[in-house]
Amino acid sequence: MRVFGFVFVLMLISGSFRPFAEDYILLGPKTFSVKGSTSIGKYDCDYKLDTKDTLYLNQKIGINYKIPVKKFGCGNFLLTGDFRKTLKEKQYPWVFITVSDVRKEGQLYRYNLRLDLAGKVKHMKNLKLRSEKGGLKGEIELKFSDFDLEAPNKLGGAIKVKEEISLLIDLKTL
């Protein structure tokens, strides 16, 4: 037993023993945002989730998020209502996001994402999360048409929502 203890202490001192903290990241609050623009300005619809999770590195397993469309907020009730209608909230009340296969590459993290939105599933591989003070952030460029959705128009087409949108993922670390 003494020999094992001695070897363990030598490994700690020499640096050949790495704590398990490199195998996972503890996550706190998360924000999922959809950003886009119209012919008259920009919009930003957010969903904030205040839960704690463990994000395992270098493993195929991931974290699943079930997000109620009705909880996205866009800053005012008109934008929020239009956003929910565009995502077909009544027919598809949930957005499902899975972050998996996270691995560190230098200052970045690479990961895979499964996005189930309005009844359509999109798989994206080898995306980037930037390590920033207090968390991990990523941005994914999408289009409404990727999910068979139509960008809405208002006032007889005078106000047009652009086809391109961004999904921003902000994962705070503990």
Image (tube, helix red, strand yellow):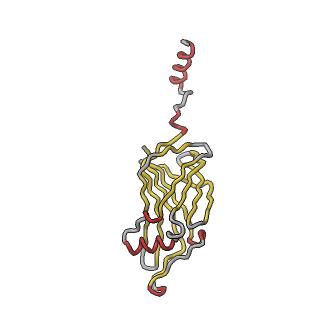
Q: Residue at x 51, y 59 (%)?
A: 139
Which residue reaches farthest bottom? 156
Residue 8 at x, y = what percent? 54, 20
Q: Is residue 87 above or below residue 128?
A: below
Which residue reaches farthest front? 90
| Quadrant of residue 147 within the rendered picture | bottom right
Which residue reaches farthest left? 76
Q: Is residue 149 above or below residue 3?
A: below
Q: Residue at x 46, y 71 (%)?
A: 83
Q: Residue at x 46, y 85 (%)?
A: 158
Q: How many marks?
A: 0
Q: Residue at x 50, y 70 (%)?
A: 90
Q: Is residue 104 left or right of residue 132?
A: right
Q: Is residue 150 above or below residue 106?
A: below
Residue 69 at x, y = what percent? 47, 64
| Quadrant of residue 104 within the rendered picture | top right
Quarter holding the C terminus is: top left
Q: Is residue 15 above or below residue 116?
A: above
Residue 105 at x, y = what percent? 58, 46
Quarter holding the N terminus is: top right
Q: Is residue 98 left or right of residue 171?
A: right
Residue 39 at x, y = what percent? 46, 79
